[in-house]
Structure formats: structure tokens, C-alpha cells
Amino acid sequence: MACVRLIALFDSRTLQRVINALVIIIIIYGFMSVLHAGIRWTNALVFGKLYYCSPVWSNTLKKNISKLQKFQNFAGRIISGTWKFDHITPVLKELRWLPLSSYLKYTLGVLAFKSVKGLASSYLCDKFKTRAFFHDHNTRNKDNLNIPGYKSASGQRTFLYLATKLWNSLPCDLINSASLIIFKRKLKDFLFSNAF
């Protein structure tokens, strides 16, 4: 019962967040004279609200992510001036916007990088352990993070499970980045190339 209330609360807050962002987009469209100005305003005012605390709510149901993706598509159509029935993928490519599911992976990846490299809070850093920490066997996956053994669907949507699974799927050159700035750039390029 508590889960149903939580989902209903998320749905109402998501709806309110989308309505507020739609109002901002319509206001931006009224004052937009240059495409780049509209992109900056949208990134600052709209996506700042939309992506606020995204690592916390990124484990939501796919139908909620689909609603927010439709909103991102609408914002791309307003900015670029494309029609309702035109394909949105070329618009998102041109604007260099990650689809929402890829953006959520981006935020999880950044938090995982900070946690593994010791740049995050200690309670997060202590959660991420390599497989070599648990056993002394010399296996090819000894440097991968240990994925928690959740069997339920809700357990597999937790931050720790999703972040470790994403971290283990990243290429070695991305994981071994020298700094957070380089990692962010490489991760965005990696996710962008996989999304389109």
C-alpha cells in the first residue's frame, strides 16, 4: 500500500514539475529570437527543474520516464520549430541532448565514478567494493564492482544495483579517466553514441 502511495505521489509531483516546465518553455518561446539563446534558457530553467535529484528518482517506473521523455521531445520541438509529426531523433542529435534514459545513466555514472574514486561521501564510497575485496581468486572480473544479489524487480532498480551494473558495462578507458571532468565528457560522448 505504501508503494502505491509513493508512486501516486511521484506521479503528481512529476505532473506538477512538467506543467511548471511547460509554462517556462512557452515563455522562452515567446522571447526566443536566436536558437542558441533558447537552448541556454531551456537548459538552465527547464532541465534544471526536470533533472533535479534525478539519481534519487531514476529508479522509477518506465511509464514515468516515458512521460518525462515526451516532455523533453516537446521542448526540442519548441526550440527547433519542428512539427508534431516530424521525427524527434534528428532534433535531439542536433541539440546534443541525451534521451532521458541515457541522461539518467549519465548521472548514475558520475555518482559511481565519484564513489569509486573516493570523491563522494564516505557512506557512498563504502558501498562500492570490487570483487577482489570479497575473494582472492584471480578471475578476469576481479576489478569489476560486486553487483548486489537482488532478485526482486524493486531491488534491481536501486541506486547501488543500477550504478554498479552500469559501471561494469563501461569500457576500461572510460573507467580509468584521470579526472571527473574528463570522465563526464567521455561518458556523455559514449552514451550519446549509443543512444543514436
Image: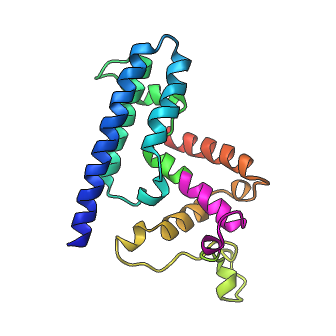
Q: Is residue 14 above or below residue 155?
A: above
Q: Is residue 119 above or below residue 179?
A: below
Task: Report the magenta stretch's main SS.
Answer: helix
Q: Is residue 170 above or below residue 39?
A: below
Quadrant (top left, top right, bottom left, bottom right) of the N terminus: bottom left
Location of residue 147 (image quadrant): bottom right
Q: Is residue 58 above or below residue 30?
A: below
Q: x%, y% of residue 37?
A: 54, 19
- Residue at 55 percent across and 61 percent down: it is 166
The residue at the far top in this view is 33
The residue at the far left in this view is 1
| Labels in figure, total | 0
Location of residue 139 (image quadrant): bottom right
Q: What colouring style does the render use?
A: rainbow
- Residue at 44 percent across and 48 percent down: it is 101
Q: x%, y% of residue 68?
A: 35, 43
Location of residue 46 (image quadrant): top left
Magenta stretch containing residue 144, yes or no?
Answer: no
Q: x%, y% of residue 108?
A: 54, 57
- Residue at 66 percent across and 60 percent down: it is 113
Q: Which residues are magenta?
A: 107-125
Residue 29 visible in the displayed image: yes
Q: x%, y% of residue 136?
A: 71, 89
- Residue at 41 percent across and 70 percent down: it is 156
Residue 94 visible in the displayed image: no
